[in-house]
Image (cartoon, rainbow, N blue to C red):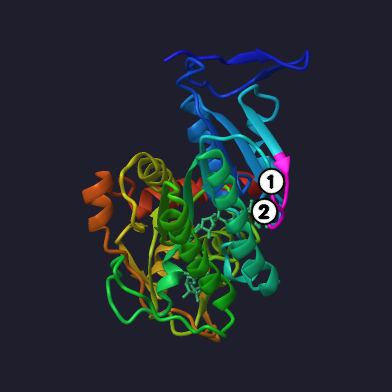
Amino acid sequence: DHERRTITYDGSLKKYPPVRLLRNCDRKRILVTGGAGFVGSHLVDRLMIMGNEVVVLDNFFTGRKNNIEHWLGHPNFELVRHDVVDPFMIEVDEIYHLACPASPPHYQYNPIKTVKTSVMGTINMLGLAKRTKAKFLLTSTSEIYGDPKEHPQKETYWGHVNPIGPRACYDEGKRVAETLTFAYAKQEKLDVRVARIFNTFGPRMNENDGRVVSNFIIQALRGEDLTVYGEGDQTRSFQYIHDLVDGLIQLMHSKAHEPVNLGNPDEYTIMEFAEIIRDTVNKEVRIVNLPSTTDDPQRRRPDITRAKTFLDWSPKFSVMQGIEETVEYFSKLANDL
Ligand code: NAD
Ligand code: UDP
């Protein structure tokens, strides 16, 4: 493992995180759509450190340059502002297709655009994979199981989704994205992977993201009430970002040609989770109940037998470890402002 800490590029000196030096024939050219977002930027870090060439495509709807600014100017790194709804031409070996808003307030902001991003964006990236013969990985979601009637959720479960509710643009969009991915695999012999990601959290979540972990941590740090939607008896299982990144890379390198759940089976009611955040971050804050949201899934926990069997993967971080690091990140962010 070689380190290359200081590189002169455009005449200036900049310190980059150390990356592995690979021979040209061993280095892959990897496209990460949505690479300026929360999950994408962590994936980019890992792929860069492994010594690959990484191209990020992002329209900055929810992503930020800040998340990847430590790589700007690095010879192995390229950032392109581009909307995946429009075709894109490039030569690559692997595509991690993440581009899509993921938090309910963001994907519901413009539902038509969310569907276009999932459907047209995925067709464009699959077309690119077909032309370049690149391996293709789609980040799908536990939301394709909807409000599940089977618990925990196995990959064989077909789901229970309201096709016209407020979450449909995301859930049905991802369902079609999966359909397209497997249609291209069958019809065009594409080499594809599909990750069904369960709730994931960590540093670099957008402060305005609106998902429960960042909301509760930010509220507790600001001394505001923690907002539980409904009674708080609905459940979620939370995975820390570094485990997900391991899982995505292991999935790409595996022979798993069927969808694979990636999540931490550690399940909490939202009320229990609010109490944990209050007790860890700020015991002074209150927990308040707000009206529940439409079609909110009542229970969610992954069955990860398939990931264990085919990828030899299971989460390594406890939820508490993840919370501690995420709290540290948001506290620092608040102090820097
Ligand atoms: P995020 O909102 O932080 O990142 C999404 C990224 O995609 C952003 O950088 C955004 O600017 C970009 N983007 C959105 N629309 C685009 C478009 N039309 N063209 C180009 N770029 C576009 O969300 P995230 O949590 O990082 O999610 C990343 C992926 O993982 C998404 O596909 C999401 O569905 C999936 N996922 C995430 C979770 C989770 O808990 N974080 C759970 C399930 C699935
Ligand atoms: N939630 C909540 N308060 C918040 C944000 C979310 O009680 O401030 C609830 C939400 O109703 C859902 C759960 O937390 O039951 C997870 O919501 P999130 O938006 O994080 O993800 P998703 O619903 O997509 O799993």
Q: Considering the whole magenta stretch, tell me its main secondary structure.
A: loop
Counting other residues with Cα less than 10 Å from the Cα at mark 1, is it few (<14), some (14-19), or many (20 or more)? some
Q: Measuring 68% from the left and 48% from the top, which residue is drawn there?
A: 58
Q: Nearer the viewer, residue 14 or 83?
A: 83
Mark carried by residue 36: none
Residue 207, percent from left and from top:
63, 57
Vertical comparison of 19 with 319: above or below: above
Q: Position of residue 83 (x, y in %)?
A: 71, 53
Residue 327 or 169: which is nearer the viewer?
A: 169
What amino acid is at disc 2? Val
> Where residue 127 appears, x then y in whole percent?
58, 50
Q: Is residue 13 left or right of residue 194?
A: right
As helix, strand or loop, the secondary structure at mark 1 comes to loop
Classify mark 1 as within 8 Å of ligand 1 or not, answering yes or no. no
Around disc 2, counting alpha carbons within 10 Å, would you say few (fewer than 14), some (14 to 19), or many (20 or more)? many
Q: Secondary structure at mark 2?
A: loop
- In the image, what residue occupies the spot 44% across and 62% down? 199
Magenta-tinted stretch: 80-87
Q: Residue type at mark 1?
A: Phe
Q: Nearer the viewer, residue 292 or 320?
A: 292
Q: Which residue is mark 1?
A: 88
Reply yes or no: does residue 107 show up in magenta: no
Q: Nearer the viewer, mark 1 or mark 2?
A: 1
Vertical side of 234 occupied by 190: above or below: above
Residue at the spot of label 2: 84
Contact between marks 1 and 2 (CB within 8 A): the answer is yes
